[in-house]
Amino acid sequence: MGFILYLIVGGIIGWLAGLILGKDVPGGVIGNIIAGIIGAWLGGLIFPDFGPIIADIAIIPALLGAIILILIVSFVMKSMNKKR
């Protein structure tokens, strides 16, 4: 049950990060889950654990990490489209 909750929280974090930035995460729901989980990992590396923790994910650093990840992905995708 913990793994499913982890996926749900990751998806919500990825979705919120996309909403905050006004950008769609490629891949739909799966992309949101991946962005949320990788964002949680990235946020854990950059920021200390603070704020509420759900399913072993510190929400605020995970959200900040997902925002950074989506910005990087959108920048890379935009520069790839310009090269074509």
Image (cartoon, helix red, strand yellow):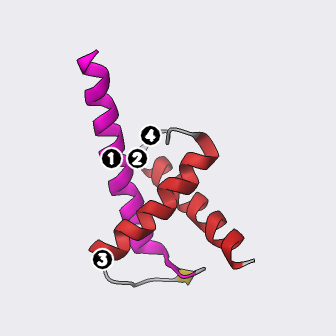
Q: CA distance from mark 3 to mark 2?
A: 20 Å
Residue at (28, 38) in percent of width and height: 75
Above or below, comparing residue 41 to residue 15 in the picture: below
Give the x, y percent position of residue 31: 55, 47
Q: Are marks 3 and 2 in contact (CB under 8 Å)?
A: no
- Eye-nearest disc, 2 or 1: 1
Query: Does residue 4 lie above or below 31 as drawn?
Result: below
Query: How would you rate the neighbour count of disc 1 (Cα within 10 Å): few for under 14, some for 14-19, many for 20 or more?
Result: some
Whether the residues at callouts 1 and 3 have beta carbons within 8 Å, the answer is no
Residue 55, how many percent across, how many down? 60, 79
Residue range of the region highlighted in magenta in the rendering: 56-84
Query: Distance between the Cα atoms at labels 4 and 2?
Result: 5 Å
Dot 3 amino acid type: Phe
Disc 2 crowd, CA 10 A, few/some/many (<14, 14-19, 20+): few
As drawn, the label of residue 21 is 2
Classified by dominant secondary structure, the portion drawn in magenta counts as: helix
Residue 61 in magenta stretch: yes
Q: Position of residue 49 (x, y in %)?
A: 38, 84
The three-letter code of the residue at mark 4 reads Lys
Residue located beneath label 3 in the image: 47
Q: Which mark is residue 71?
A: 1
| Residue identified by numbered label 4 | 23
Q: Which element is circle 4 on?
A: loop
Residues at discs 2 and 1 in contact (Cβ within 8 Å): yes
| Mark closer to the observer (1, 4) | 1
